[in-house]
Amino acid sequence: MADKQNDKLILAIVGMPGSGKSEVAEYLQNKNIPFVRFGDLNDEELKRQGLDWTPENTAKIRLEMREKHGMDVYAVRSKPKIEKLLQMNNIIAIDGLYSWEEYKFLKEEFKNLFLIHVYAEPPIRYERLVQRSSRKFSCAEARTRDISEIEKINKGGPIAIADYLVENNSNDFDKLHDSINLLLERLKDKKYER
């Protein structure tokens, strides 16, 4: 199926918690670019197990799923949804690609996968996580999650080799949206064969 989709584009949004990944995904969705949120699989598993959403429970589920099913489990389980969206759209986004293994799996399946690293400095990210209305973290929890995601989920690889960097240190959504618009313009002219 992937060979038939060489003209389709997948934008995978990567970055640390609180960097603005979900805001970018929401903005793309408002521009009629559908997205797959890997975290939905986590939410489904929490519900299945009857667990409340807490930082501890989400970390537990993330690690359990990867231990049981492999480090690329979120990508493997999301592949049918990605393929379905690509049948109807020329461009889609992925929110929540974490591990190096997820990246390798998707890159093998979909040649036109581009990584967008949304970056914000740690103190700014932590403050955002404290202020969130849902999925809140304390500063200490956010720091612990950063380290856990880097050490246990291999999150650093996709961030390090991202195709594009979007800086998001201000809380100015217009500036962030302008950066995304510029990126989309650049991608429009790009030859997708790589």
Image (tube, helix red, strand yellow):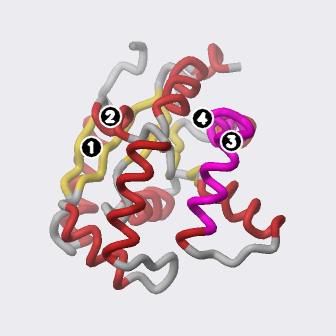
Task: Return the disc, 2 or 3, that comes first in the chain's sequence.
Answer: 3
Q: Do labels 2 and 1 touch, CB within 8 Å?
A: yes
Q: Secondary structure at mark 3?
A: helix
Marks counted in the figure total 4
30 magenta-colored = no
Q: Do labels 1 and 3 touch, CB within 8 Å?
A: no
Residue 121 sits above or below residue 14 on the image: below
In percent of the image, x 52 and y 56: which residue is there?
A: 32
The amino acid at mark 2 is Leu
Report the residue marked by disc 4.
71
The amino acid at mark 1 is Leu
Task: Return the disc, 3 or 4, that comes first in the chain's sequence.
Answer: 4
Report the residue marked by disc 2.
187
Q: Secondary structure at mark 1?
A: helix
Q: Which residues are magenta?
A: 57-79
In percent of the image, x 43 and y 52: which residue is there?
A: 148
